[in-house]
Amino acid sequence: MRAYLEIAKKSFQEMLSSRGEALIRLLAMLLSLYLLRSFWKGLYAGSDEVQGMKFTSMLTYATLSVITGGILNIFGLLQVYIAYWMARKMRSGEIVMDLLKPTDFELYLFSHSTGRLAFNLMFSVPVAILAFIVFRLEPPPGPAAAFLFMGSLAIGYLLVFLIDFLVSLIAFWTTQTRGVGGFTRLIIALLSGSFIPLWFFPAWARDALSWLPFSSIYHAPLSIFIGKLKGAEAMKTIAVQVAWALVLFALSRVLWSRARRHLMIHAG
Amino acid sequence: MAEIEVKDLCKEFTTYVRGHGLAGSVGSLLSRNRTVRKAVNHVGFIVEKGEMVGYVGPNGAGKSTTIKMLTGILYPTSGTVRVCGLCPSKDRKHNLMHIGTVFGQRTQLWWDLPLIESLELLRYIYKVSTKSYKENIERFCDILDIDEFMQTPVRQLSLGQRMRGDLAAALLHDPDILYLDEPTIGLDVVAKERIRLFIAELNRERKTTVVLTTHDLTDIGTLCRRIIIIDTGRIIYDGPVEEIRKRFGSESSLLVVFKEEPRGLSLQDAEEIVVDGLQARIRFDRRRIAASDLIGALLKEYPVSDLTIEDTSLERIIREIYLEGKLDAGLS
């Protein structure tokens, strides 16, 4: 296990070596926060409540969505980092060097990814604090909600990773994930509630989406945070999240062993 | 028990042939021509512990594909590989724990971090004890001089330095077997020599088994006693380097550019002369005639503007083995 912790540390260090990039991301994050606030302010047009949703709660949701995006992955909507990484390595044949490590490949990638997550946390949390003060946002309703939020967010991260990993394995057959990567990104953006919360969807869509893994990424933790999901309903949502994590994990094991057999490396 | 046992090994790759030009490209969206290429074709050999074997062939002969199957990252299409009794593709992690691999064209080092960081990480991945980690780092500093650039980000290293770093990384866990795939590619003469000396010493002192692929015959000449030559996926020679050297080692070619077309060019001691306009390739045996004598004879008779001496190339050796089949004894 120590090896995986060290991989995460190296991945974190590697991120630190590109500080310029981090600064640009930080600016992008601040800009999207400002834009989103203007967007929702415009939509609410001075009214305090729309469809039973208070403006402050909505703004809290939107702000957290940007910050969660920044934490879970590079920023905003780009959640398929591994898929692009894999396709690049596959095309150059560089994947050989990663496969030559006596490690579990999925866990190896997860450690990489978690190192980046730690780095993202480092600059996202201060932004979150700043946004809460400047926008005068609402804290979670109680310690229980705060705790559930963090648990739900952690499972959300696992799901992002698993979806990304599964998509990336397509590169073993096609050496290309641009199309499917972009599609996944779009699906996550639309169906996860990252941009538009699911309660603005029609009831049938909302119901259907709450059973899919995507809503676990943003909608579940953020709704818990603003107190929209609580009690038994919150527990049910988390149970769905855990179930999806288990299913996708099992799937990833099966698909990975098949992908490995299918590996073709022509270059060098 | 042999350390590496390869039997009847085959690897096929499926590729799709695309049509040419715009029409062809659009056409191949609808229907594709599937072709199967045999990268490795019924290859078999045995390597004993402590042996140093050169695995040689031109580009695309199947060298790297074989190495990738030995390391277990590629599954064979058919045939078997046994490394220390394990099946590398099925027992990938166990196999990888006691082998080291260097691919000359790639690096396993973290590009943006100083060299030491990559070595530190490998220590945990391979569960190297603190004591042997320290000893090995000291040893690498001694012979590979990696301490000169230990704190430098890998992307800033020269190719020679990076290769030394990669060697250190591959050997940190004292592997039983070292696979080297084109380890000297792109290096200058001094750097090449240094890598060769290091590998020779490693094999002598630690009895590390070395399988070395290259298309630079000098690598083989200085390092290996045994050579396996592979071409288009098949082994065409497996035997002592000495035999190849005896057969081809004294042969050279003289490349000549004349000032005017040399009519009826003939030299007494040349083995073969091929004239192409103003240029000619004269093959000769140094045991029969010294290069200086041959050149002297040539200059006396013909107006020459440029001269180059070339050693026998791998491609020619392969052609010869095919054509003449004189090394039947060594064929497997």
Image (tube, rainbow, N blue to C red):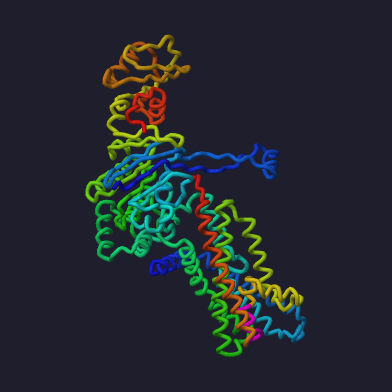
Residue at 46% x, 42% y is B10
B131 left or right of B87?
left
Q: Quadrant of the C terminus of chain B?
A: top left
What percent of the width, then of the height, locates residue B70?
40, 48
What percent of the width, then of the height, locates residue B302?
38, 12
Which residue occupies the foreground of this view, B8 or A126? B8
Which residue occupies the foreground of this view, B6 or A203? B6
**Is residue A24 in sight in this rendering?**
no
B139 left or right of B163?
left
**Residue furthest toward the top?**
B264
Hey, which quadrant is residue A204 in on the image? Answer: bottom right
Which residue occupies the foreground of this view, A115 or A248? A248
- Exactly how many numbered labels are in the figure? 0
Hey, which quadrant is residue B154 in on the image? Answer: bottom left
Q: Is residue A222 magenta?
A: yes
Residue at 36% x, 27% y is B310
Which residue occupies the foreground of this view, A40 or A173? A173
A32 to B259, vertically: above or below: below
A227 to B157, vertically: above or below: below
**Is residue A101 in sight in this rendering?**
yes
> Which residues are the magenta region?
A220-230
Residue at 36% x, 23% y is B253
What percent of the width, then of the height, locates residue B231?
43, 34
What percent of the width, then of the height, locates residue B28?
67, 42
**Residue furthest toward the bottom?**
A142
Q: Is residue B326 magenta?
A: no
